[in-house]
Amino acid sequence: MEPSSPEEVARFPPHIIELIEKFNVSEACFLPPPISINLILQLTWLDISIFAVLTAMTVLSVIIYLENTYYLLKKVRCPFKKKTLAWNSAAPTVIGVTSCLGLWVPRAVMFVNMVASIYFAACFYLMLLVIVEGYGGEEALLKHLETVSLAVSTGPCCCCCPCLPRMRMTRRKFRIFVLGSFQVAFLRPVFYFLGTVLWTNGLYDPQDLSATSVFLWMDLFLGVSTILGLWPVNILFREAKLHMADQNIIAKFALFQAILILSSLQNSIIGTLAGAGHIGCAPPYSATTRGQLMNYQLLIIEMFIVGVLTRISYRKRDDGPGYGALDATQPKDQEERGRQTSTEDAKGQDTGNNNLEV
């Protein structure tokens, strides 16, 4: 005898049964998302056509990203820049692929969102590296900014900290900036791992937004972490957009912010509308699942457009160094000349000292 699916063995509380009988509401509105095979069997030809078009857009976005990565590997001189630009430009593709998986496998929504969120958290640190490597490395950045007065009262903390004084960049402050962006990439995987562990015991529910919800408090903490991680990137960007205009840094940062808004704010708005009952149930989807489906459909289209724009902004030949050590390397003849000069200077100093002694 085959095991029954959760839809067949579901036991509703009395008030749910009363709603189903009194208002003729479908049972699917109170059930978890359907498994993939049942979903495919219940889709209409129109739904399958929409899913197929969105899947084709996802595949095309992957092809565009691979072609852009091949270009970066060939046209960017610095190996550090190659890796940073390739990984950072993959953000819209990764979010598009995970959204497509969530479209076909609605029960994997929590894990799909985790993967997309963890990858984009790493992009906070990668975006900071793009700015640093655009200057030519940490040493070049510190040398350029040591005489520049940086505005600290910038977004996203400009509203609560408008009176902060301007600052001069030092090595210690730069380390704090790096930690500020890196903590997002570190804390999100840790918190999502804890959430997965708690989910196995029924303590982590993304649909529970009550005051005692573990998910709500963890999400609020990650929101604060995201704001703190975006702050140092914004501070450096305000100066970098003047120095790195030829590297399309404005377009790169604008796309980064667009992905942040579309992947975070859009999901929150649709989730709130679904929880408030403004998005109706449509079997085989409940209201919450339908809201997630709408978000994924929009994300696939949006990330495809952002992926095309990313290819345009990142597709630029770059022969500049991205690491301080590359600036310090010199040809052998220059090194020999430097050694000879230093030797002659040392001899001159010794001669001068001997004359003084005499």
Image: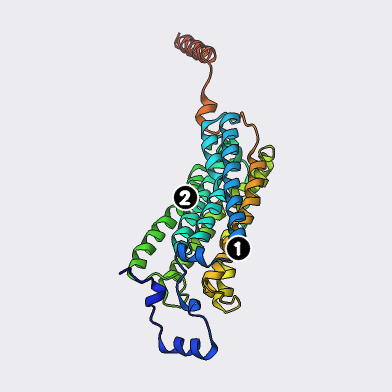
Residue density around tag 2, few if under 14, some if 14–19, many if 20 or more, within 10 Å? some
How far across and how far down the image is residue 13, in percent? Answer: 40, 86
Q: What is the three-letter code of the residue carrying label 2? A: Phe
User: Which residue is rendered at x = 45% and y = 72% of the image?
Assistant: 32
Q: Nearer the viewer, residue 209 or 28?
A: 28
Q: Nearer the viewer, residue 33 or 275?
A: 33
Q: Is residue 226 above or below residue 76?
A: below
Q: How is the image coloured?
A: rainbow
Mark nearest the camera among 1 and 2 is: 1
Residue drawn at the location 51% of the way across and 63% of the way down = 40
Residue 266, percent from left and from top: 60, 64
The residue that disc 1 covers is 45
In the rendered structure, which amino acid carries the disc numbered 1? Trp
Using the numbered discs, state the Cα–Cα distance from disc 1 to disc 2 in whole angstroms.
Answer: 46 Å
Q: What label does residue 182 carry, if any?
A: 2
Q: Quadrant of the C terminus?
A: top left
- Asked if residue 202 lies left or right of residue 17, the reply is left
Cβ–Cβ under 8 Å for marks 1 and 2: no
Mark 1 nearby-residue class (10 Å; few <14, some 14–19, many ≥20): few
